[in-house]
Image (tube, grey):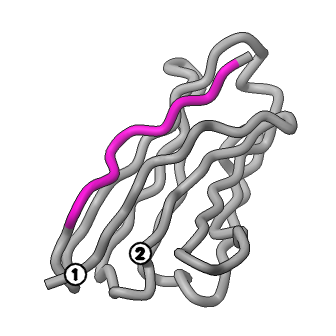
Amino acid sequence: AQLVEFGGGLVQPGGSLRLSCAASGFTFSLYGMTWHRQAPGKEREWVAGISSTGISTNYADSVKGRFTISRDNAKNTVYLQMNSLKPEDTGVYYCNGRTYWGPGTQVTVSS
């Protein structure tokens, strides 16, 4: 099984990015998926989660109202739309599903 994240980059404060995580090797539609991030010098933290059907979502307080998690089970992909980005959102973003982790994608929010 494999998860691969895409879409990271450098963005100015207040900007937006959309991360994607492509899954393969397991029945994606049966599993809830989560996004996590790790800032330099800090532990990895949970950011958002989505149920297997996409009906239920939840968010860390630090991103609520700014980030949106979604999924497309036909494409075996989960997304994280990030708006109103802040410098403190900087870090490596990882997706997780069925205990698998992707390698991560770097997000840097800086002017």
Pointer 2 residue: 90
Q: Secondary structure at mark 2?
A: loop
From this view, report whether residue 92 is shown above or below residue 55.
below
For residue 5: magenta? yes
Q: Which residue is mark 1?
A: 110
Q: How far from the left and from the top, in percent, is residue 55?
A: 69, 51
Splitting the image into 4 quarters, where does residue 108 fall? Answer: bottom left
In this rendering, position of residue 47 left or right of residue 89? right
Residue at x-position 24% and y-position 68%? 16
For the point 28% across and 76% down, the residue is: 109
Which corner quadrant holds the C terminus? bottom left
Q: Secondary structure at mark 1?
A: loop
24 drawn magenta: no
Residue 94 position, x and y percent, is: 59, 51
Query: In the rendered structure, are the residues bearing label 1 and label 2 in contact, judged by CB atoms less than 8 Å apart?
Result: yes
**Residue 11 vertical position relative to residue 32 in the rendered view, above or below:** below
Would residue 67 appear left or right of 32 to someone viewing this image? left
Q: Nearer the viewer, residue 47 or 38?
A: 38
Q: Which residues are magenta?
A: 2-10
- For the stretch drawn in magenta, what is the main secondary structure? strand
Is disc 1 surrounded by few (<14), some (14 to 19) or many (20+) residues within 10 Å? Answer: some
